[in-house]
């Protein structure tokens, strides 16, 4: 039996106890062994929604509907959190002692308790207070992803790749779902209070869902943001001054209903990778081959293909056997997970107040502010954490879409995104 598998078996049979220090041990023992409430909530099934339900419900708001929405969020979120707390508790001892995991566990435990004890909302005034409460939690949880990714990278030695990846998928999908429900409810409340007038916008929205989202505009927006960011490609010899053109083809007029933040996260990440690869592959050239973004409006789904000539995915820079391994959090599938510089970047981001992913505009702002852990002179620039592609995959699949990467090794990469456009798929939280 290999050393790794021996270790896996030994660690799984150990008593689950997440933290080393005695004070924490006492309080977490309470969490682990005495709280019947967690069992009660974790025995309930989450009630997943479709995009269409979120839109229809939010289209015409009155006090009664807003209060109903508030109470759905109030009772649904602790159920979803309880399932993930149970997941964390089932991890082997050695995993839960890794840096980052304890922080996530504490955040979730505290949020679970707060939701559980939150009294029913009966009117607008109470809803305002509830929205403030939600906004506070969203902010408090901003660093969950780097903390979790750091912990899981460090745990990669002790978990089989399938276990690690399915755990991360459940954690991340569930987190997206909770944030969607909380943010949607806050946005609906703000619209009801007259703080936003979404119908005046060229891309109208219901809550956080943009009902006339134009993919071409989102691609242009992301390309522009990246054009002015030389920060994250300075680690290559390529000349950051030479622009990489993004050409858009296909159905430029196509509009559909989707969560802008999710779509633009994916577009931004794929373009960023393509620009980086193109600059790296053609370092020294005075003209760089363009990136082609093609938009397709299918009957049931929208499609987007991003094509570059950046040399493909299975080059020396990427330590994977096949493209899908880039979505993995396990170092066995993607050895970059254990790279010192990435761990340092995750550590920096995990103690940084703002989340590393929010809207793409905020992402760009965050890069500027994140200190580079490897530069002692304090020069600030973007640090690579390796979260972008796995997160894009999670975003694409959240409402039943897909993200696929095809590599023409030595030449370039095609990324295919498919997002259902009828809004009838349930959120992928049925676990
Ligand atoms: C998260 O961001 O991880 C959350 O669970 C947010 C939720 C508590 C509103």
Image: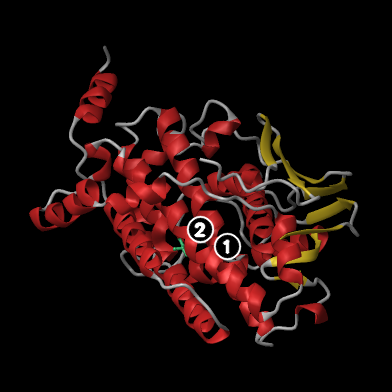
**Rendered location of residue 38, percent (x, y):** 33, 51
Q: Residue at x 81, y 78 (%)?
A: 199
In the rendered view, how is the structure colored?
secondary structure
According to the image, label 2 marks what residue?
76
Q: Which quadrant contains ligand 1?
A: bottom left
Q: Quadrant of the N terminus?
A: top left
Mark 2 secondary-structure assignment: helix
According to the image, label 1 marks what residue?
181
Q: In the rendered image, which quarter is residue 405 located in?
A: top right
Label 2 with label 1: CB-CB less than 8 Å: yes
**Rendered location of residue 378, percent (x, y):** 35, 70
**Is residue 7 visible from the viewing direction of this image?**
yes
Q: Nearer the viewer, residue 44 or 382?
A: 44
**Rendered location of residue 410, percent (x, y):** 66, 30
Left or right of 45 on screen, residue 1: left
- Looking at the image, residue 344 lies above or below residue 189: above
Left or right of 414 on screen, residue 71: left
**Mark 1 Cβ inside 8 Å of ligand 1:** yes
Q: In the rendered image, which quarter is residue 91 located in?
A: top left
């Amino acid at each position: 039996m290999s050393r790794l598998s021996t270790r896996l078996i030994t660690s799984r049979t150990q008593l689950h106890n997440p933290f080393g220090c005695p004070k924490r041990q006492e309080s977490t023992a309470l969490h682990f062994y005495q709280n019947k409430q967690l069992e009660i909530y974790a025995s309930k099934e989450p009630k997943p929604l479709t995009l269409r339900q979120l839109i229809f419900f939010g289209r015409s708001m009155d006090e009664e509907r807003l209060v109903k929405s508030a109470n759905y969020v109030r009772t649904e979120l602790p159920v979803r959190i309880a399932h993930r707390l149970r997941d964390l508790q089932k991890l082997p001892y050695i995993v839960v002692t890794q840096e980052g995991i304890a922080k996530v566990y504490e955040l979730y435990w505290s949020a679970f308790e707060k939701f559980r004890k939150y009294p029913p909302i009966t009117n607008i005034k109470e809803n305002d207070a509830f929205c403030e409460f939600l906004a506070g939690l969203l902010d408090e949880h901003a660093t969950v992803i780097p903390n979790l990714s750091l912990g899981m990278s460090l745990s990669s030695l002790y978990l089989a790749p399938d276990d690690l990846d399915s755990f991360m998928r459940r954690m991340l999908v569930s987190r997206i779902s909770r944030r969607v429900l909380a943010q949607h409810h806050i946005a609906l409340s703000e619209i009801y209070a007259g703080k936003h007038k979404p119908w005046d916008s060229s891309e109208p929205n219901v809550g956080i869902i943009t009902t006339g989202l134009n993919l071409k505009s989102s691609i242009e927006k992301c390309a522009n943001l990246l054009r002015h960011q030389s920060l994250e490609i300075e680690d290559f010899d390529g000349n950051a001054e030479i622009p990489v053109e993004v050409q858009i083809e296909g159905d430029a007029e196509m509009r559909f209903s989707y969560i802008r933040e999710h779509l633009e996260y994916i577009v931004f990440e794929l373009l960023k990778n393509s620009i980086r690869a193109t600059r790296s592959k053609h370092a020294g050239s005075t003209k760089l081959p363009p990136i082609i973004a093609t938009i397709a409006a299918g009957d049931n789904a929208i499609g987007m293909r991003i094509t570059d000539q950046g040399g493909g995915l299975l080059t020396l820079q990427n330590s994977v056997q096949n493209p899908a391994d880039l979505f993995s959090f396990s170092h066995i599938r993607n050895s970059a997970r254990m790279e010192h510089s990435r761990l340092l970047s995750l550590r920096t981001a995990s103690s940084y107040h703002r989340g590393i992913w929010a809207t793409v505009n905020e992402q760009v702002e965050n890069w500027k502010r994140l200190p580079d852990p490897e530069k002692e002179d304090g020069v600030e620039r973007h640090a690579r954490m390796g979260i972008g592609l796995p997160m894009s995959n999670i975003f694409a699949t959240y409402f039943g879409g897909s993200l696929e990467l095809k590599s023409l090794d030595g030449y370039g990469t095609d990324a295919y995104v498919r997002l259902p456009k009828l809004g009838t798929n349930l959120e992928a939280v049925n676990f």
